[in-house]
Amino acid sequence: MQTLILLTGGRGRRMGGVDKAGLLWDGRSFLARILDRLGPSFDEILLAGTTSPPPGLPRARAVSDRHPGGGPLQGIAAGLEAMSGERAFLCGCDMPLVDPAVVRRLLEAQGPHAAVVPRVGGRPQFLHAVYGRACLPAARELARDPGVPVARLLDRVDCLWLDESELADLPDWRDSFVNANTPEDLHWLPGRTDRPTPS
């Protein structure tokens, strides 16, 4: 069984306090677009950081953070705690261009590793990565305190750092990592070739 964990608990401060999962692009929400792209490939869908799934998502299950607003590690820990399988692909709900081919490549690369985290432009993409159940003990312990960075979790587990050269043969693979953090970022999404470097 493979699980999809979507982080939906962010406060969207840089987006003006807007729930990024519900942001509309061309009439459809970010969350709906991500589920259209990835949902068919996963047996289980968890929305980490929310109390109830939006209407019309019968397969999605809400999972609450231990410390709401305490950062993405809280969502990672909550998702790993709730998942039924042994591994999950996890991403933020602000990545509406996430590419199923890129996700498959990350899952295929996992092997015996506890996690697979790609580096794009030299930056670790913690919120577009694969996490196995082996990460749960460390995630559970670190999540006792809000605000702990995800990097602390990866310091404690066997993580495969995937260089971007391992993705370069996939068409438009960089699009998968583009996220929207500010209202200005929304202008980069529709069919632009001069997108900023993923952050």
Image (cartoon, helix red, strand yellow):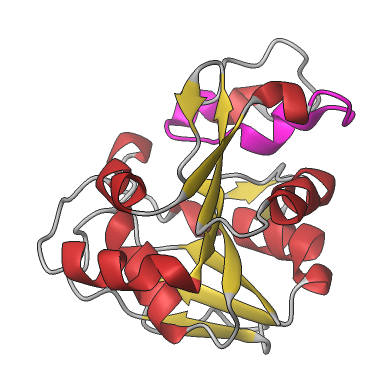
Q: Is any atom of residue 149 visible in this view?
A: yes
The total number of labels drawn is 0
For the N terminus, give its image quadrant: bottom right
82 lies above or below 10: below
Q: Residue at x 73, y 50 (%)?
A: 103
**Residue 27 location in percent, x, y?**
72, 52
Q: What span is colored magenta in the figure? A: 168-185
In the rendered image, residue 175 lying in the magenta stretch gets the answer yes
**Residue 95 location in percent, x, y?**
60, 44
**Residue 106 location in percent, x, y?**
70, 48
Residue at the top extreme of this rendering? 194
Q: Residue at x 54, y 77 (%)?
A: 46
**In the figure, is residue 185 to the left or right of 17?**
right
Residue at the left extreme of this rendering? 145
107 lies above or below 45: above
Q: Residue at x 68, y 57 (%)?
A: 111
**Residue 54 location in percent, x, y?**
54, 78
In the rendered image, residue 197 lying in the magenta stretch gets the answer no
**In the figure, is residue 146 to the left or right of 111?**
left
